[in-house]
Amino acid sequence: MTTFVLVHGAWGGAHGFRTVRGPLRAAGHEVFTPSLTGIGERAHLASPQVDLTTHVTDVVNTILYEDLADIVLLGYSYGGMVVTGALEHVADRVAHLVYLDAFKPVDGQSLDDLAHAGYGKGAIGPGGEWLVPPLARAIHDIREQDWYTARRTAHPVGCFTEPVRLQRPVEEYPFTRTYVKATAEPRDPAGTSPFWQAADYAKTNAAWRYREIDTDHMILANKPAEFVSLMLELTAAS
Amino acid sequence: VTTFVLVHGAWGGSYGFRALRGPLHAAGHEVFTPSLTGLGERVHLASPQVNLTTHVTDVVNTVLYEDLADIVLLGYSYGGMVVTGALEHIADRVAHLVYLDAFLPSDGQSLVDLTGAPYGAAAVGPGVQWLVDLPFRPPGGEAQGDWHGLRIAAHPVGCFTERVRLPLPLAKYDFSRTYIKALQEPRFDDRLSAFWRAADHAKAAQDWRYREIDTDHLIPVNKPAELAEFLLELG
């Protein structure tokens, strides 16, 4: 039995994992999908004080209060920032770290540094916007589009501007590492697409496993069965 | 498949249901145990602004964002305040409401009203404490003491002083109702007699089911198998 801790992305919520919790549990595993403060079902807790540290603490406290060990810790998209920051506190409880089409920062990098999104100073000073409106995303099943769109909430900017803390390079920890890339996403012509950069790095580095799913960034909504198969394959092998 | 939404008590957290999730999942059911803001694993979000409405919203948003229907909604202890307040928003998604040794407020009552606890005007004014420490014994048997004791968090007082809103008396709602009482608690204790009053009401009323578990208040920790059995019967 494996314990999965799945961390959702920006503008999302734990509900994004509804397609995969059932199949993973049916295979005998435990699944935790902590909701990040200020978005999704915790949208009522949004404030200018919510930042990356808040979300790191959301995830770390789930692991420590539930006393989880030997976990598969997965960060999806922005969740890659969060699971990276969580290592400061829970690295010894992680057996396998998975980035799912996710940001893979090094120590001191923020999402803004990686994405060149121009969120700047964030919520500081007059006129500073602290809520970032959601990026539009397409769900393949148009019957589901409204359901997901209604649940996409604005994201506190401090999550994107705060640099992550990471004591040593991810490659130096004893856990297994996997990067999973959604391959239907276009490569940024300027070569600055952070998910492709991370994927290319993992693909050519012996410290990483690398897998692909042939779909766009919305993997959990669009290819849940493939995601589950991949997780079961990775955990069987680790 | 039944969907259970289990709401923890004061000073607690969703980890309190850890012994219960396994048996319910194993029987094929879905289980959600939302963590209330400012407590347990969400202790880093404690603030004087956290009140009953915050916790009601924690639970309501879990149900609405996950789009859950026909749920068994259970409130344990203080969680009875929360599930009662949740009905304003999600009564139509509740198939069965369960109070587990819990507060059973009517419209306009706060936990302070039910217990007579002296939390007064809450976090208003100079020198007033907004965090309430656990006022009685640490939970659990000896084996559980340290693990649970470490996880107890002080509780924002606004949760205890804010009055619940309940648009209709519980009897007017369509869902079925169960009260489960922990028998090993003394009847004449100011803090806990509110649970006995609620139990006595449920026992005598036609529109309630009434069950008993022979243990103390910490049912999810001390008698998870018995509790799971009751819940599977409802599911």
Image (spheres, coloured by chain):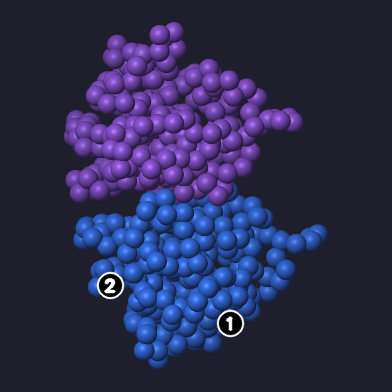
Chain colours: A purple, B blue
Q: Residues within 10 Å of mark 2 (few under 14, many from 20)?
A: some
User: On what subunit does the disc labeled 1 rest?
Assistant: B
Tell me the kind of residue under disc 2. Answer: Leu
Q: Which mark is residue B40?
A: none
Residue A4, x across and y down, in percent: 31, 41
Front position in the image: B196 or A139? A139
Name the foreground residue: B80 vs B77: B80
Identified at 35% across, 27% down, the residue is: A217
Which label number is shown at residue B234? Answer: 2
Q: Earlier in the sequence, mark 1 or mark 2?
A: 1
Element on which disc 1 rests? loop
Residue holding disc 1: B190
Q: Position of residue B107 (x, y in %)?
A: 56, 76
Q: Is residue B136 left or right of residue A215?
A: right
Quadrant location, the N terminus of chain A:
top left
Tell me where residue B95 appears, x and y as whole percent: 34, 69
The picture quadrant where one finds residue A33 is: top left
Q: Residue at x 24, y 24 (%)?
A: A214
Above or below, B48 against A81 in this view is below
Q: Amino acid at mark 1?
A: Asp
Mark 1 vs mark 2, foreground winner is 2
Classify A217 as above or below A44.
Answer: above
When the figure is inspected, residue B170 is found, relative to residue B11, above or below; the finding is: below
Secondary structure, mark 2, is helix
Tag 1 and tag 2, C-beta contact below 8 Å: no
Label 1 Cα neighbours within 10 Å, binned few <14 / some 14-19 / many ≥20: few
Judge whether residue B152 can be spotted in this image: no
Direction from residue A155 to residue A234 in the image, left or right: left
Specify whether B106 is left or right of A235: right
Quarter location, residue A189: top left
